[in-house]
Image: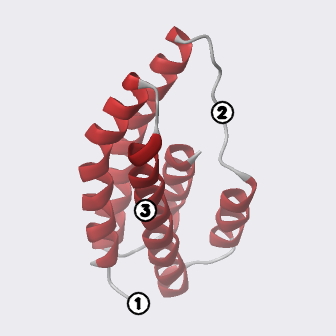
């Protein structure tokens, strides 16, 4: 769900933000999270499991809020959503790595953790206004 939310909100950023740094970050999120979503989809298919095809309810609410904003207000809220989302995802990855049982999912989590940490750091560096 996080990958899907990142992709959706970043498409909004490309349409709504006039800030070059925000737009560059958004394009990177679309590229990285589209690639990242392919891996768990393939893993789920191999294991006979279907993953959701849309962001979670809270993430959709955030997306709806973002869709009503523009300019500096959009940029500030987008940054807030990106920081919170990547922070939560990083926490979930670390938690799963401490007790997870599936070797393939653990490998994906280990591979993904530094990328998510990097995205969090980039989000924190986005302009505040």
Of mark 1 and mark 3, the one earlier in the sequence is 3
The answer to whether the residue labelled 2 contacts the one labelled 1, judged by CB atoms less than 8 Å apart, is: no
x, y percent for residue 7: 49, 48
Q: Nearer the viewer, mark 1 or mark 3?
A: 3
Q: Residues within 10 Å of mark 1 (few under 14, many from 20)?
A: few
**Residue 53, disc:** 2
Q: Which residue is mark 1?
A: 129
Quadrant containing the C terminus in the rendered view: bottom left
44 lies left or right of 69: left
Q: Is 42 above or below relative to 22? A: above
**Residue 89, disc:** none
Give the CA distance from mark 1 to mark 3: 20 Å
The answer to whether the residue labelled 3 contacts the one labelled 2, judged by CB atoms less than 8 Å apart, is: no
The local secondary structure at tag 1 comes to loop
The local secondary structure at tag 2 comes to loop
Q: Nearer the viewer, mark 3 or mark 2?
A: 3
Quadrant containing the N terminus in the rendered view: top right
Residue sitting at 71 percent across and 61 percent down?
A: 58
Residue sitting at 52 percent across and 71 percent down?
A: 81
Q: How is the image coloured?
A: secondary structure
Give the CA distance from mark 2 to mark 1: 32 Å
Residue sitting at 38 percent across and 36 percent down?
A: 36
x, y percent for residue 35: 36, 33
Q: Is 126 above or below relative to 55? A: below
Res 82 → quadrant: bottom left
**Residue 86, disc:** 3
Give the CA distance from mark 3 to mark 2: 19 Å
x, y percent for residue 28: 31, 52
Q: Nearer the viewer, mark 2 or mark 1?
A: 2
Res 120 → quadrant: bottom left
Q: Residues within 10 Å of mark 3 (few under 14, many from 20)?
A: many
């Amino acid at each position: 769900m996080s990958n899907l939310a990142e992709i959706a909100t970043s498409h909004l950023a490309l349409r709504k933000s006039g800030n070059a740094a925000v737009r560059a970050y958004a394009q990177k999120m679309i590229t990285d999270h589209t690639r990242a979503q392919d891996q768990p989809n393939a893993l789920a298919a191999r294991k006979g499991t279907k993953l959701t095809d849309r962001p979670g309810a809270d993430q959709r609410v955030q997306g709806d809020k973002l869709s009503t904003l523009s300019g500096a207000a959009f940029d500030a809220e987008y940054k807030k959503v990106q920081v919170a989302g990547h922070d939560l995802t990083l926490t979930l990855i670390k938690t799963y790595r401490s007790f997870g049982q599936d070797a393939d999912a653990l490998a994906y989590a280990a591979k993904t953790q530094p990328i998510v940490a990097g995205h969090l750091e980039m989000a924190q560096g986005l302009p505040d206004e």
